[in-house]
Amino acid sequence: MEPEIQRRVQRYGWNKAAEFYDISWKDQLKPAQDKVLDMTNLQPGEVVLETSCGTGLVTFRAAKKVGEDGEIVATDLSEEMVEIARNEVQTLNLNNITFHRMDAEELQFDEELFDKAICSLGLMYFPYPLKGLKEMHRLLKPGGTAAVSIWGERKNCGWAGIFPIVDRQVTSDVCPLFFQQGTGNTLQNSFQDAGFKNIEIDRFKVNLNYPDSETALTAAFAGGPVALAYQKFNAETREIVHNEYLKSIEPYQNGQGYKIPGEFVAAKGVK
């Protein structure tokens, strides 16, 4: 898929997924978000860049850590995600966050502006992940720390069948190279190629818990990376892909719900 097409697919796909994102993934993604915040060890007064901020699940937590004297500059490619985050921040009475709809591979900020940089579960969607990491490196002050989290290897993610299931119904790959950065030493090599030093990698397994099939289906289709394609499916096609996905996760049934294995990889590096 051409990079510009991939960016449009991601932008409009996450626009479609935005309203379902928190209810589908808030609890499931928390271990990866916790790891990014632990790795960066945000301090009061720091200025922090966040790319792929989504609906602000990490943003708001980071804002509380840096306090009123600090600042979070959060970006995302999806305007719908950014709008949800902007609306939520007003109810939380946080005045140290600014949101921007912006491509993480071409950030419109002056270099060496930030103390820390974070990206939780966004790097997999970049057409050129290395370019996104180089942008983070460019914008960090010397000695600044960047941390990212991504999904791990395909074989360790029990929900991964969603991609071929949807691909059989559309003409192009809905999410090419999704698991590439999480495979082997790829993420560590990317950090090195981006210029980071003192790199630390943490690979860990989790379980994604869903109380019933409806919740699992919403997360997989309406609230995730295949949302754009899913919105175009008619009722018959939706029934087909629903049945195929439920069959793929059948080994992970836990009573009426599901306990689906997953894997995250987190990385930290210093400029």
Image (cartoon, grey):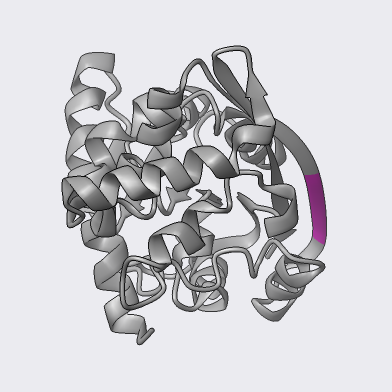
Image check: 143 left or right of 49?
Answer: right
Q: Inspect this view and state whether residue 175 appears.
A: yes
User: Magenta span has 200?
Assistant: yes
Q: Position of residue 103 (x, y in %)?
A: 32, 67
Q: Nearer the viewer, residue 245 or 174?
A: 245
Q: Magenta stretch: dominant SS?
A: strand
Residue 59 in the image: above or below residue 23: below
Tell me the magenta residue range: 199-203
Q: Position of residue 176 (x, y in %)?
A: 48, 73
Image check: 178 left or right of 220?
Answer: right
Q: Nearer the viewer, residue 266 or 112?
A: 266
Q: Which residue is located at x 53 percent, y 49 percent?
A: 121
In the rendered image, the residue lying farthest to the top is 255
Q: Inspect this view and state whether residue 63 appears.
A: no
In the rendered image, the residue lying farthest to the bottom is 2
Q: Which residue is located at x 53 percent, y 62 percent?
A: 124
Residue 53 in the image: above or below residue 57: below
Quadrant of the image containing the C terminus: bottom right
**Looking at the rendering, which quadrant does residue 108 occupy?**
bottom left
Quadrant of the image containing the N terminus: bottom left
